[in-house]
């Protein structure tokens, strides 16, 4: 199985770097430890079913298990096309769904409370990064009032902020896999323009200052693109807890933007995949 897995992985050159990194992690952590040493013809339906059940018992989310199963299925599919096996042992393997997480929508007051907490964390000698962070408070308001994904915000460069036209150009996203940040095209695959609320413009101008146009708007301490996990664990989650918003995620701010726009009467705009999005009224 290990040989077929590596041969399959070698065919992924056309995929996004973040996707290849994610597949590599799935291979090394889940697929190869279970099946790498076994002849691919000996991997049967029962063995795969047991593997899936063990992951569920370990507490892995259904979405994660499904990704692991799909990687194994692709490897076996490649082996079928090579003539090594006749049937795919992954076919018919079902995964019980995890409980659906209810979407959270914040009020404008909750957004401001979260922004204030992340701006002014309580000082602790053991946590030297807990210091006033005006730029992170602005980030919270920016996410809630523009609807950008957190990776898209961390992929913004100063040149992407068009203050004259009051809009933001989303040209890239900062993806993180296993602690490594890669810059990719946006999830939609194309550049899109998002209205920039006037209430954010002056603060963003001050944040950008006289930095180069290719500088990241929200860089890390090395002036590189910021890691999402670092932001969530060290800043966002503690601030949400202090604001009595435990469980809120950065992505909930995207849902919040849509909810606020609906309240303001913004008409839905059909997207390419048929779902409804909203634009600023």
Image (cartoon, rainbow, N blue to C red):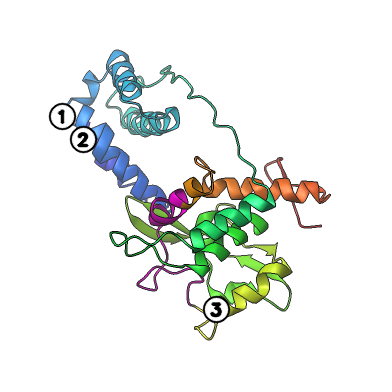
- How far apart are labels 1 and 2 at the CA level? 7 Å
Q: Is residue 124 left or right of residue 116?
A: left
Residue tagged 2? 2
Query: Quick one: 170 or 222, which is closer to the camera?
Result: 222
Quadrant occupied by the N terminus? top left
Residue at horizontal 51%, vertical 45%?
249
Is 231 one of the magenta-colored residues?
Answer: yes
Residue 126 screen position, x and y as percent? 28, 59
Residues in magenta?
215-238
- Foreground label between 1 and 3: 3
The answer to whether the residues at label 1 and label 2 have Cβ atoms under 8 Å apart is: yes
Q: Is residue 33 above or below residue 150?
A: above
- How far apart are labels 2 and 3 at the CA level? 49 Å
Residue 184 screen position, x and y as percent? 47, 59
Identify the element where label 1 is drawn: loop
Residue 204 screen position, x and y as percent? 60, 73
Label disc, if present, on residue 78 of the rendered structure? none
Residue tagged 3? 208
The answer to whether the residues at label 2 and label 3 have Cβ atoms under 8 Å apart is: no
Residue 132 screen position, x and y as percent? 46, 68
Location of residue 276 (image quadrant): top right
């Amino acid at each position: 199985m290990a040989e077929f897995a590596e041969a399959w992985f070698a065919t992924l050159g056309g995929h996004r770097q973040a996707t290849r990194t994610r597949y590599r992690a799935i291979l090394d952590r889940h697929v190869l430890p279970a099946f790498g040493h076994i002849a691919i013809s000996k991997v049967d339906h029962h063995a795969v079913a047991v593997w899936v059940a063990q992951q569920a018992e370990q507490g892995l989310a259904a979405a994660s298990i499904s990704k692991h199963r799909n990687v194994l299925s692709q490897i076996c599919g490649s082996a079928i096309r090579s003539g090594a096996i006749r049937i795919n042992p992954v076919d018919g393997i079902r995964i019980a769904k995890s409980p659906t997480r209810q979407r959270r929508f914040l009020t404008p007051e909750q957004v401001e409370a979260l922004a204030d907490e992340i701006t002014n964390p309580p000082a602790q000698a053991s946590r030297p990064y807990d210091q006033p962070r005006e730029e992170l408070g602005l980030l919270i308001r920016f996410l809630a009032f523009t609807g950008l994904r957190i990776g898209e915000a961390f992929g913004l460069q100063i040149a992407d902020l068009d203050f004259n036209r009051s809009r933001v150009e989303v040209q890239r996203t900062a993806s993180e896999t296993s602690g490594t940040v890669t810059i990719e095209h946006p999830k939609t695959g194309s550049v899109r323009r998002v209205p920039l609320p006037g209430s954010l413009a002056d603060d963003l101008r001050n944040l950008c200052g006289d930095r180069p146009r290719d500088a990241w708007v929200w860089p890390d301490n090395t002036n590189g693109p910021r890691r999402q996990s670092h932001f969530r664990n060290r800043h966002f989650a503690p601030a949400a807890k202090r604001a009595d918003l435990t469980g809120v995620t950065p992505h909930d701010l995207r849902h919040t933007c849509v909810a606020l726009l609906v309240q303001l009467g913004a008409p839905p705009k059909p997207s390419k995949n048929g779902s409804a999005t909203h634009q600023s009224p």
